[in-house]
């Protein structure tokens, strides 16, 4: 049986990665599969933005920030990540849970 | 430590998907934001949202009124410490408009949208928006007066829609 890549990664109690620097695209792919999100180019656009933004600010971007800084609209964000757009994007991107309330 | 899973992201109540019923009954600027922020937070957490706007709360979803909501400077005990406006001065002409202008500025600084844009945002996020039929009849409003996407609903129908939901009344 092939080893699950997620067994090699540390997660907190809510399933967010403890160390964002340990993230790779393969891990992102595996997290998305665990969350039952099928990744498209549009998902990756959001994930890449979230990682780049975290790099410069130290915080995962809020949903509003994602919709303002990328060409992904609010409606599309909810289509891409129906169970909660900002936190699912952060989860897949290997970042901590976002705390912003907008 | 928990491996990521879909279940960790789902706010599942006892009867299936968790649902929030928000009732907005006040139309001042300061009372428009709590239901909007809570509706948005719920949708961001994957919770279904039904919003019922009644009495003065209708102003929040009335096209002609929603951009110009004001904060009261008279009879508002919070006005004095925050804005430094004693009640006796609050009654002067233009005071309410000035305080509202200040508050809109503070809200903007926090990166929060203005009321019309915020309404559009929560509706794009999937919140359902209803105007109270009885209040609308009283104020001589029709569905055309409401923000696009809002529908007119009776209180009993709202009860049917929100069976099992958690309720927040603002």
Image (cartoon, rainbow, N blue to C red):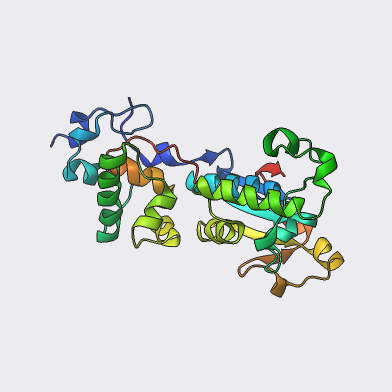
The answer to whether residue A36 is left or right of residue B25 is left
* Quadrant assignment, res B148: bottom right
Q: Quadrant of the N terminus of chain B?
A: top left
Residue at image location 56% in from the left, 43% down from the top: B18
Residue at image location 52% in from the left, 40% down from the top: B12
Compared with B51, B136 (above or below) is below
Where is residue B7? Give x, y as percent. Answer: 41, 39
**Residue B85 visible to an observer of this rendering:** yes
- Comparing B17 with B76, the one in front is B76
* Quadrant assignment, res A87: top left
Compared with B124, B105 (above or below) is above
* Quadrant assignment, res A23: top left
Q: Quadrant of the C terminus of chain B?
A: top right
Q: List the single residue furthest toward the top.
A: B1
Q: List the single residue furthest toward the left.
A: A2
Where is residue B156? Give x, y as percent. Answer: 78, 56
The answer to whether residue A38 is left or right of residue B16 is left
- Comparing B8 with B71, the one in front is B71
**Residue B162 visible to an observer of this rendering:** no
Residue at image location 59% in from the left, 44% down from the top: B38
Where is residue A92? Give x, y as percent. Answer: 29, 43
- Comparing B61 with B44, the one in front is B61
Residue at image location 37% in from the left, 27% down from the top: A13
Compared with B166, B63 (above or below) is below
């Amino acid at each position: 049986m092939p080893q699950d890549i997620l067994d090699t990664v540390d997660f907190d109690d809510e399933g967010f990665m403890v160390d964002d620097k340990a993230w790779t695209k393969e891990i992102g792919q595996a997290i998305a599969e665990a969350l039952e999100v099928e990744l498209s180019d549009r998902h990756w656009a959001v994930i890449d933005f979230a990682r780049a933004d975290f790099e410069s600010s130290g915080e995962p971007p809020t949903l509003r920030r994602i919709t303002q800084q990328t060409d992904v609209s609010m409606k599309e964000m909810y289509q891409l990540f129906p169970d909660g757009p900002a936190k699912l994007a952060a989860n897949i991107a290997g970042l901590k849970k976002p705390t912003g309330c907008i | 430590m928990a491996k990521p899973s879909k279940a960790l992201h789902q706010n599942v109540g006892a009867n299936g998907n968790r649902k929030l019923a928000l009732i907005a009954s006040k139309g001042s600027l300061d009372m428009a934001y709590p239901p909007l922020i809570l509706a948005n937070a719920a949708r961001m957490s994957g919770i279904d949202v039904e919003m019922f706007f009644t009495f003065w709360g209708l102003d929040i979803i009335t096209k002609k009124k929603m951009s110009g909501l004001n904060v009261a400077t008279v009879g508002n005990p919070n006005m004095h410490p925050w804005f430094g406006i004693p009640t006796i001065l609050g009654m002067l002409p233009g005071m309410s408009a000035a305080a509202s202008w200040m508050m809109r500025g503070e809200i903007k600084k926090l990166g929060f949208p203005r009321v019309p844009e915020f309404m559009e945002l929560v509706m794009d996020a999937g919140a359902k928006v209803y105007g109270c039929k009885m209040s609308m009849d009283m104020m001589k409003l029709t569905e055309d007066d409401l923000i696009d996407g809002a529908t007119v609903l009776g209180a009993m129908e709202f009860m049917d829609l929100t069976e099992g939901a958690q309720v927040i009344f603002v």
